[in-house]
Image (tube, rainbow, N blue to C red):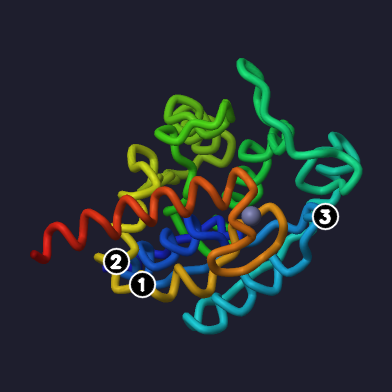
Amino acid sequence: MSKEKAVVVFSGGQDSTTCLFWAKERFDEVIAVTFDYGQRHRLELECAADIAKDLNIPHHILDMSLLNQLAPNALTRTDIDITEKDGEPPSTFVEGRNLLFLSFAAVLAKQYDARHIITGVCETDFSGYPDCRDVFIKSLNVTLNLSMDYSFVIHTPLMWLDKAETWELADELGAFDYVRERTLTCYNGIKGSGCGECPACKLRQNGLNKYVAKREAGSK
Ligand SMILES: [Zn+2]
């Protein structure tokens, strides 16, 4: 049997790090790919590189600065505030991000003869990002297969999990403490438990509290 290889779209955050552990359990060979699109916090890229090194996973950092040329946004520009308005995607939404990232990940994956692509997108905590929806991922999967005449399988292990369940998955994978301490999710660029104030930190912390409470209730 040929070895099953997988490429993980990896940012160094909680979700994609959990996906990296998930992929390591399932596939013979795992490759991580991180996109540099001019993130405000360069620490994100360092964090991703450190984790890949730690887990002994080959890691590519691809230059996607053109994304910021096309559409400046709150994740890349310090002069744009992180805001959320009802009925609108938040200012952290980067138009076309997952379309472009997954397409580039697929091109890279094919070079490795890796059929499997893993992404941490999630519809449950749907923050108004249209390219995190399951229907979009399925549609893109078909398109990628047609474009390269190849049988990619895009895996989305977090698609239907809430943040508490994502912590639970990390725990099942034996990576709970690792994910809690070593990943960076915070919009203000603070590793681990973060600034505690930004929307990403709040989401992460609420999920963590909920999961820890559930785990404690279960162990009594
Ligand atoms: Zn934060």
Foreground residue, 178 or 71? Answer: 178
Other-residue count near label 3 (Cα within 10 Å), few / some / many at <14 / 14–19 / ≥20: some
* Front disc: 3 or 2: 2
Give the label on residue 175, or none: 1
Q: Amino acid at mark 3?
A: Gly
Whether residue 24 can be seen here: yes
Residue at point 54%, 31% (across, down): 127
> Looking at the image, which residue is at 30% across and 69% down?
25
In screen coordinates, is 145 left or right of 170? right
Residue 146 in view in this figure: no
Mark 1 secondary-structure assignment: loop
State whether label 3 is within 8 Å of ligand 1: no
Q: CA distance from mark 1 to mark 3?
A: 28 Å
Q: Nearer the viewer, residue 183 or 98?
A: 183
Asked whether, in this view, residue 175 is left or right of residue 105, the answer is left
Foreground residue among 213 and 42: 213
Q: Which mark is residue 121?
A: none
Q: Is residue 210 above or below residue 141?
A: below
Query: Are the residues tagged 1 and 2 within 8 Å (C-beta)?
Result: yes
Residue found at x 45% / y 69%? 179
Provide the residue designation for mark 3: 38
Task: Give coordinates of residue 50: x percent, y percent.
Answer: 61, 79
The C terminus - image quarter: bottom left
